[in-house]
Structures are given as structure tokens and as C-alpha cells.
Amino acid sequence: MVVQAARVTSSTVVVAVDVGKIEFAFSATDVTRTSLLRPRTGCPMTGSSLAQVVADIVEVLPVDAVVKVGIEAAGHYHRPLLNAAWPIGWEVLELNPAHVTEQRRVLGKRTVKTDVIDLQAMTELLLAGR
């Protein structure tokens, strides 16, 4: 079943999540591409770590924010975060890794693979409504 992502509006905030085997990286960006939090890497893949990340994001969200969370598929490693208890109303989307790779190429970073560059690529995909 294909689910269409909600439209991006002026109140959209995107949270990009790049998953590894035992840790994840994330960024939070508004629709004007202003970073709400510096990208963070090395977050342990634990419930308490995710709860802290969510709390940090909530603290900087504009009052009327509509949040889209994009998590790049990574074998089975991304599933705990995909199925985590994100705040009610936040849209959680699984991103195709081939699309993230293509977006890195569009950004001119085809051969450069870092968590921060992947977060930038995911942010662009989410803001484009992919």
C-alpha cells in the first residue's frame, strides 16, 4: 500500500533521521531550510535517547508546526525508530535509500557519504514532498 505524504506547508518542520546499527543521527529544519537544531550524530539507539531527541525538538518547534519525520530505510536497523512512539500528530515516513543517494548526487555530494550530508539529502526529499 502506497501512502501519500501530507503536503508541505509554511508551518512544516522536517526531522531527518539517519540510522546505523547501534546509533542514529538527526536534524530538524523548517520549511525555509533554517536549522532548528544543529545536526546531531552518535545518538544511541535507545528509548531514552529518542525521548531526549524528541524533547529537544519539541523545545524549538514553532507553535503551529506540522512535523514530518523521515527515516531512511536501513535493512532492519531502522525499524525500531520507524515503529517508535513519536508524538501524536507527527507524520513518520520511511525513505527509500536509493532516493537519498540520488538526492546526494543532486546536491553534488554523490561520492561523499557522511551522516550530515545524508541528513541534508533527506531534508530536501521531505521538503519536496517525496
Image (cartoon, rainbow, N blue to C red):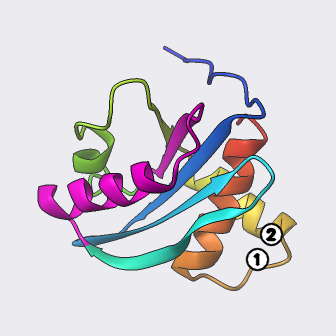
Q: Describe residue 53's horizontal placement relative to residue 27 as left or right.
A: left
- Residue 77, x across and y down, in percent: 27, 58
Give yes or no for contact between labels 2 and 1 (Cβ–Cβ under 8 Å): yes
Does the image show residue 79? yes
Name which of mark 2 and mark 1 comes first in the sequence. 2
Compare residues 14 and 19 and report the one nearer the observer.
14
- In this view, the residue farthest toward the top is 1
Secondary structure at numbered mark 2: helix
Secondary structure at numbered mark 1: loop
- Residue 96, x across and y down, in percent: 56, 46
Give, as a three-letter code, the residue at label 1.
Answer: Arg
Give, as a three-letter code, the residue at label 2.
Answer: Arg
User: What residue is shown at x 86% (from left), y 65% (from top)?
Assistant: 106
In the rendered image, which quarter is residue 88 located in? top left
Q: Residue 105: which numbered mark, if any?
A: 2
User: What residue is shown at x 76% (from left), y 77% (from top)?
Assistant: 110
Q: Does the magenta stretch include residue 48?
A: yes
Relative to 66, say whether 128 is above or below.
Answer: below
